[in-house]
Image (cartoon, helix red, strand yellow):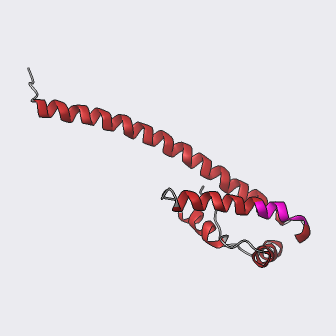
């Protein structure tokens, strides 16, 4: 059977090919971004664990790392409008304030073993 395409149909087929190529790139980049996000959330979990083992005076660098990661993720969400999982959004919100009071608040919660309300296991 001979199929004859009009110029319009051929143009649509070319657009479909281009769309498929772009979607393949998007999927690849999305998977890579997901890996980066998972890495950052694992780092936050590790820093929280380290804080749980130290005195407050020894935790400055750990908190610095947590708030650096919070800044990276907030930039991802707000500057690039990247859709993030709800647990990452909650982390961004909870750790928005970086001062000694908030660091002491989080330190006491971590030291007491209280639930932080953050679930990074799905990242």
Quadrant for the C terminus, please: bottom right
Q: Is residue 55 visible?
A: no
- The one nearer the camera, 8 or 107, is 8
- The one nearer the camera, 86 or 8, is 8
The location of residue 89, given as percent across then percent down, is 56, 66
As drawn, is 18 to the left or to the right of 85? Answer: left
Quadrant for the N terminus, please: top left
Residue located at (9% from left, 30% from top): 6
Asked if residue 73 is positioned above or below residue 30 in the image, the reply reads: below
Asked if residue 32 is positioned above or below residue 100 in the image, the reply reads: above
Q: Residue furthest top?
A: 2
Residue 112, quarter of the rendered image: bottom right
**Magenta span includes 90:** no
The location of residue 69, given as percent across then percent down, is 68, 58
The location of residue 86, given as percent across then percent down, is 54, 65
- The one nearer the camera, 57 or 106, is 57
Residue located at (88% from left, 71% from top): 56
Specify start and end residues of the magenta stretch as a single range: 58-64
């Amino acid at each position: 059977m001979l199929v004859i395409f009009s110029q319009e149909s051929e143009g649509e087929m070319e657009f479909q090919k281009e769309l498929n190529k772009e979607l393949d790139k998007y999927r690849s980049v999305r998977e890579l971004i997901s890996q980066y996000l998972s890495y950052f959330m694992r780092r936050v979990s590790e820093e929280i664990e380290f804080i749980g083992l130290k005195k407050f005076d020894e935790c400055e660098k750990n908190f610095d790392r947590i708030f650096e990661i919070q800044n990276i993720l907030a930039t991802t969400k707000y500057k690039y409008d990247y859709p993030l999982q709800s647990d990452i959004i909650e982390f961004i919100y909870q750790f928005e304030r970086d001062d000694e009071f908030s660091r002491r608040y989080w330190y006491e919660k971590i030291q007491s073993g209280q639930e932080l309300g953050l679930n990074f296991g799905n990242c």
